[in-house]
Amino acid sequence: MTVARRPEELAAARRSVAIGTFDGVHRGHRRVIEAAEAAHLRPAVVTFDPHPRMVLGGGVELLTTTERRLELLTAAGVEDVLMLHFDEALAGLEPEEFAESTLRAIGAEVVAAGETFRFGRGRSGDLDLLERMGFDVRRVPLVENISSSHVRHLLSTGDVVNAARLLGRPPEVDGTVVPGERRGGGLGFPTANLALPAGLLLPGDGVYAGEALGHRAAISIGTNPHFGGRERRVEAHLLDFDDDLYGERLVVELWEGLRPQATFATEAELVETIAADVARTRAADRPN
Amino acid sequence: MPPRALDPAGVALVDKPAGPSSFAIVAQIRHRTRARTGHAGTLDPFATGLLLLLSGRATKLAPCLVGLDKRYLTDIDLTARTATGDPEGEIVETLEPPGEAELERRVAGLRGAIELPIPAASAVKIGGERAYRLARRGVEVEMPLRRSTVHALEVIAYTDESVTLDLSVSSGTYIRAIADALGGHCRTLRRTEVGPFSVTDAVTPEAFEPDMLLTEAEVLARVERGQDGVAP
């Protein structure tokens, strides 16, 4: 994959371009990419970093880091990406100027986008404008309510199964393994504690079944109320795995919600519950 | 001609560009491997996308692979029908593109079991001659009907004059026939999947290296998993 930061870094070609923010690279995003690929020109994805809403205000909890977004675009078969640095200057360009200096500059003839895509100063540019400028515009309608904001809503309530349906793959938490309280090891269930990059959405509190590094994993998200914790954490117990992961990046898939977080009368009760979580994790199915 | 080598054996996933015939791609790969080479289902010259090329001993896998379901992306020009259902045929009828509701109604009628005439410009042989040669010589032929199944058919994008479709179909379905039945012709056609294999794992013919061949065992295992419905 080629990731260009400036239009002139992409090879000259007649191109069909899929444009959008593509946070989460969900099924709707993949349709936009497919609409561009159908055109038989050299496809490219034009996207933005950081997420425009981080710059324009309003704030947003992201489904994917920029790194993960690029990995998922690669998995979707994308080879050429123009990742534009989104700042006030870019946001302030007149829509025509944006289209000329980015889309036209990389040889775009076909442009595919979600039909509500907006760009340029005050979000005043739309697909009609691109059409008037001579681009062959492919409008991709929103279907089945598949949108990044809907996925965020489902995840914040812990509904990983429906989130997976919209994403076309299981949702993930993507972070770095850091030292924790070392309590889990004492209970017989050592966990990898994940530090998430700032700005990433943390799914709703609870215990989940999932997978990491090809191993089934029981994942706890929340404050560990049994131990009186305050900070929300992500801890993953990988089944049949005993390597040290400190400092490593870990992408954990969430397959199924098992139970809410809870406090227990005794440590024995806690251990018993975790053992049941592990048994259900072994039996869990990957969605899709 | 001496018998061609049985090694290297395996299956190559190649992303065919628009222009050359499938056979030209076979020849290109055979030139690299020097092995007996075949394919598991042709693509018309104008089409792009996934070709399964069988090298050496793996050519005997063809019967297990030719019947796999396929998935395609196509841009259909709704302003004209052509003699061949693709951009290479002569325009036989110009059309007023349908509105969104009418288009959706026509699309709905093409889901499930369908029976459509095999388009004139196809690789099927009639009386020993390729149908597209006959059509390009201007020979009128009565095209037989073919039964097939459209497992999924989604409108993924639209313009005033064209529509982009994503179709999952049984083996032997002619997308050009579907375009014709919809009232238009394929402007582009890209095969994105053959059974469990995806074009995202394919390489261009130029980038192909013999060490990229999937082994026969791996191919059969993936096909079986796909048929059990375990694989996505």
Image: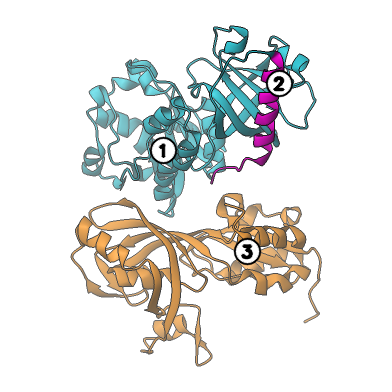
Chain colours: A cyan, B orange
Separation of residues labelled 3 and 2 (CA atoms): 52 Å
Is residue A171 or residue B23 the one in the foreground?
A: A171
As helix, strand or loop, the secondary structure at mark 3 comes to: strand
Mark 1 residue crowding within 10 angstroms, few (<14) / some (14–19) / many (20+): many
Q: Which one is in front in this view, the residue at disc 3 or the one at disc 2? A: 2
Q: Which quadrant of the structure image shows residue A21?
A: top left
Element on which disc 2 rests: helix
Asked if residue A10 shows in the view, the reply is no
Tell which subunit mark 2 falls on.
A
**Does B19 sit above or below residue B139?**
above
Q: Which residues are magenta?
A: A267-288
Say which amino acid is labelled 3: Leu
Q: Which mark is residue A106?
A: 1
- Quadrant hosting residue B14: bottom right
**In the rendering, at what x and y percent does residue B43 appear?**
52, 68
Read off the residue under disc 2. A271
Mark 2 burial class by Cα count in 10 Å: few <14, some 14-19, many 20+ = some
